[in-house]
C-alpha cells in the first residue's frame, strides 16, 4: 500500500540526489574547478526547480529569526518576509548539520577486507544489475568507489 514519505525519507532521498550531482560533476571532463562547481550549482538549482529525475520541486523560502523584523524596522532597514503559513511544515531542517553527519558516517562500519583484485569485478556486477542496491550494498559500492579514487590518486602521485 502506498504512503507518504516520512521527513527522514525525504531528507535521505534529497541528500542521495545531491551526492549523485556532486559525484557526476566531480568526474565531469571539464578543465577547471570553477566549471565543475558551476555545473554542480546549476544541477542543484535544477533539483530545487523539480526538473531533476524523479524529484519534486523544493520551495526555498526565507525563514528569518523572529527578532530580525523588529530590529530591522527599528534600524530603518528592509527586512525579509516571514514564510507563508505551513511552508516549513516538511522543511529539511538543520540540513548542513545532517549532511555533515551523513558524510562522516558513510565511511563507518564498511568492510575493509575485500581483496583489491576483486573490486573491479564486484563493481561491474553491481553496475549490470537491473534492480536497486540494498542499503548495505550501496554503502559497500560507495566505499569501493572511494577506495578506487584513492588508489588512482596514489598511483597518479607516485607515477
Image (cartoon, grey):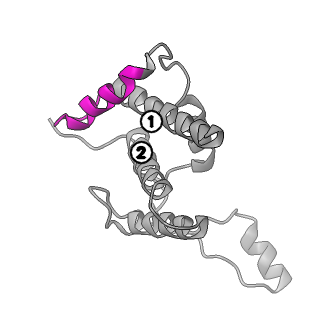
Instruction: State the residue at coordinates (50%, 54%).
Output: 26
Residue 150: quadrant of the picture:
top right
Mark 2 vs mark 1, CA separation in Å: 15 Å
- Percent position of residue 64, x then y: 66, 66
- For image coordinates 43% across by 16% down, the residue present is 115
Q: Secondary structure at mark 2?
A: helix
Q: Nearer the viewer, mark 2 or mark 1?
A: 1
Q: Mostly what secondary structure, the magenta segment?
A: helix
Q: Is 151 a magenta residue?
A: no
Q: Quadrant of residue 34?
A: bottom right
Res. 87 in view: yes
Q: Front-most of 83 and 11?
A: 11
The residue identified by callout 1 is 145
> Which residue is at the front of the view, 4 or 100?
100
- Residue 136 falls left or right of residue 32: left
Height in image: 139 above or below 29? above
Where residue 97 appears, as percent x and y from the top left, is: 63, 43
Quadrant the N terminus occupies: top left
Indicate left or right for 130 with 116 as reference: left
Identify residue for label 2: 16
Q: Quadrant of residue 76?
A: bottom right
For the question of whether residue 84 can be seen, the reply is: no
Mark drawn on residue 102:
none
In the rendered structure, does residue 133 fall within the stretch colored magenta?
yes
Q: Residue at x 72, y 73 (%)?
A: 69
Q: Which residues are magenta?
A: 117-134
Q: Are marks 2 and 1 in contact (CB under 8 Å)?
A: no
Q: Is residue 64 above or below residue 7?
A: below
59 vs 101: above or below: below
Label 1 crowding class (10 Å Cα cut-off): few <14, some 14-19, many 20+? some
Amino acid at each position: 500500500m502506498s504512503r507518504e514519505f516520512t521527513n527522514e525519507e525525504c531528507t535521505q532521498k534529497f541528500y542521495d540526489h545531491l551526492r549523485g550531482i556532486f559525484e557526476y560533476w566531480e568526474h565531469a571532463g571539464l578543465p577547471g574547478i570553477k566549471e565543475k562547481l558551476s555545473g554542480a550549482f546549476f544541477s542543484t538549482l535544477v533539483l530545487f526547480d523539480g526538473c531533476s529525475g524523479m524529484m519534486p520541486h523544493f520551495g526555498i523560502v526565507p525563514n528569518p529569526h523572529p527578532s530580525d523584523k523588529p530590529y530591522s524596522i527599528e534600524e530603518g532597514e528592509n527586512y525579509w518576509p516571514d514564510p507563508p503559513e505551513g511552508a516549513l511544515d516538511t522543511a529539511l531542517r538543520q540540513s548542513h548539520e545532517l549532511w555533515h553527519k551523513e558524510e562522516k558516517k558513510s565511511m563507518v562500519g564498511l568492510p575493509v577486507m575485500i581483496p583489491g583484485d576483486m573490486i573491479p569485478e564486484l563493481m561491474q556486477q553491481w553496475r549490470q544489475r537491473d534492480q536497486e542496491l540494498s542499503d548495505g550494498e550501496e554503502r559497500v559500492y560507495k566505499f569501493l568507489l572511494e577506495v578506487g579514487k584513492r588508489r588512482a590518486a596514489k598511483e597518479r602521485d607516485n607515477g
